[in-house]
Amino acid sequence: MDIEELAEVCKALGHPARIRILRHLLMENRCLCGGIVEVMPLAQSTVSQHLKVLKEAGLVRGEIEGPKTCYCADHEAIDRLFAGVRELLTIDQSENDT
Amino acid sequence: MDIEELAEVCKALGHPARIRILRHLLMENRCLCGGIVEVMPLAQSTVSQHLKVLKEAGLVRGEIEGPKTCYCADHEAIDRLFAGVRELLTIDQSENDT
DNA sequence: ATCGTCTATCGTCGATTAACGATTTTGAGA
DNA sequence: TCTCAAAATCGTTAATCGACGATAGACGAT
């Protein structure tokens, strides 16, 4: 995980609606877009847009099943986020710059 | 740490320049704005703006020392970020929604 | 008191974001 | 084949962001 990638993931998480969507997916395991729209006070197109951002950041995967799309959270990506924060933001003063 | 706060912190980290600035502060421990400008390919006003964002997110503290301002990274805030990600983004399916 | 240095803020510009409604696309099923 | 439902995309709007140069403010030193 490099700095650019961490920034991209953080940027994707930099909106409360997207964190809520991701949490919902973590709890439901698998979920259609419509299932999220029901829970969020946002239009379908807006939710779809947020899902796209999360997907592009790698935090969410979506399998197209006919006219539906089944989304699920990518646990590995969240683990990588952990690792990235630990790697890039936990620095001893003795370390060198990069 | 609630969802809004985590989103704010993530948003602040959602730009590579700000991650680099934070890393620099973590390594230098204390640093003037000018010291960061030297290292970054950005204008002084832009760096100052990024520092403001980081400060408002609580990731960085700045003590005014006369005409200078000494910045340092807030290690506790980074720990809170860890905790926030763990708390809000590591969810067992058995948990309830919020 | 003035000068010089450091930093914050202002104003501006183009680019991006967030939100919505409307439209299009895609398969499943009648 | 036609229709229906689900989701993505398009087009628009207001707001925000990122960058910069210019300016203003706050001391320390002369």
Image (cartoon, coloured by chain):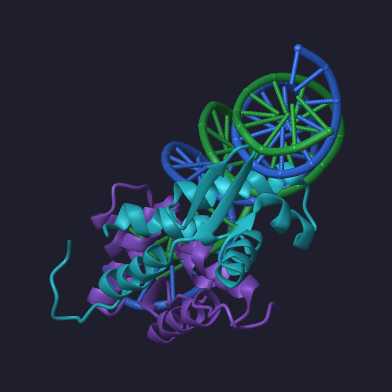
Chain colours: A cyan, B purple, C green, D blue
- Report if residue A5 is visible in the image: yes
Among the 4 quarters of the image, the one containing residue D30: bottom left
> In the image, A68: left or right of A75?
right
Query: Which residue corresponds to the image point at 38% horizontal and 84% vertical from the top-left?
Result: B75
User: Where the N terminus of chain A falls, by quadrant?
Assistant: bottom left
Name, please, the residue furthest toward the bottom.
B76
A82 or B28: nearer the viewer: A82
Q: Position of residue A41 (x, y in %)?
A: 80, 58
Q: Quadrant of the C terminus of chain A?
A: bottom left
Q: Residue at x 51, y 76 (%)?
A: B58
Give the camera-side residue of B77 and B45.
Answer: B77
Q: How many marks?
A: 0
Residue B57 in picture, x, y percent from top left: 53, 71
Residue depicted at 13% across the width and 80% down the height = A94
Q: Would residue A38 be found to the left or right of residue C27 on screen? A: right
Rendered view: B63 above or below A8: below
Residue A50 picture location, percent across and down: 61, 50
Answer with the quarter of the image where residue C26 lies. Answer: top right
- Counting from the top left corner in percent of width and height, residue D23 is at 55, 46
Residue at x 43%, y 57% (from the top left corner): A9
Displayed quadrant of residue B18: bottom left
| Left or right of B36 in this view: B5 | right
- The answer to whether residue B48 shows anywhere in this view is no
